[in-house]
Image (spheres, rainbow, N blue to C red):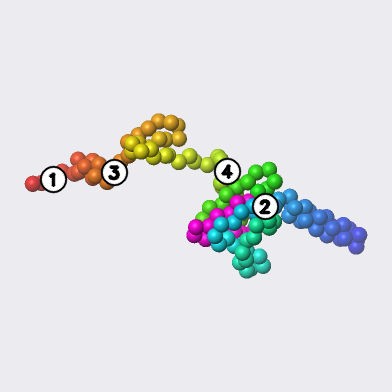
Amino acid sequence: MKLIKTLIIGMVAFFAAASLFAAGSYKVERVTGKVTYEANGEWKAVAVGQELVAGTNINTALNSSLVVSDGSSSATIKAMQKGSIETLASATGSKGLKKATLSKNNVAKKADGSQSGVATASSRASEAKKDLEWDE
């Protein structure tokens, strides 16, 4: 009976340790501004070269950024972000939304390459005025 309990406890400990190591780790490549991580309930400063476990909570302050790599790729976590390093690093991947760019001729280029005019406050106001009936 003791042998079975010992085996069960050993297997649980083994799988718990394996899941921690399988989660992966991230190496800090560059830190700009104030970036902190949570360890034992305290927030400590992140340093270049430091290894962070994937589940570590981090917080980037205003005008701060963090560049981490997992060995195969790197990710930049921008300012004003708070959460686990794994979630924030995966959110910066290339599968995200593409932003429209604004050229000098005030025409927005969409992600698909087409263009559309930029609406200004005055053009929106004139369009809204058409929707109302004015009693003069």
The first of marks 3 and 2 along the sequence is 2
| x then y, percent, for residue 96 | 52, 42
* Residue ID for mark 3: 120
Q: Earlier in the sequence, mark 4 or mark 1?
A: 4
Distance of mark 3 from mark 4, alpha carbons?
32 Å
Packing grade of label 4 (10 A; few <14, some 14-19, many >=20) is few
**Membership of 63 in magenta stretch:** yes
Look at label 3 and name its amino acid. Answer: Thr
Q: Secondary structure at mark 1?
A: loop
> Can you tell which mark lies on residue 26?
2
- Residue 41 in picture, x, y percent from top left: 63, 68
**Residue at disc 2, secondary structure:** strand
Q: Classify 10 Å Cα crowding around label 2: few (below 14), some (14-19), many (20 and above).
A: many
Task: Calculate the distance from the C-alpha at mark 2 to the C-alpha at mark 4.
Answer: 15 Å
Q: Is residue 17 magenta?
A: no
- Which circle's residue, 1 or 3, is located before the other in the chain? 3
User: Relative to 40, is 83 on the left or the right?
Assistant: left
Q: Amino acid at mark 4?
A: Gly
Q: Which segment is the magenta one?
A: 53-68
**Which quadrant of the figure contains the N terminus?**
bottom right
Q: Residue at x 56, y 46 (%)?
A: 92
Instruction: Report, in whole angstroms, how far the alpha carbon at label 4 lies from the one at label 1.
Output: 51 Å
Q: Is residue 41 above or below residue 97?
A: below
Q: Secondary structure at mark 3?
A: loop
Amino acid carrying label 2: it is: Tyr
Q: Which residue is mark 4?
A: 93
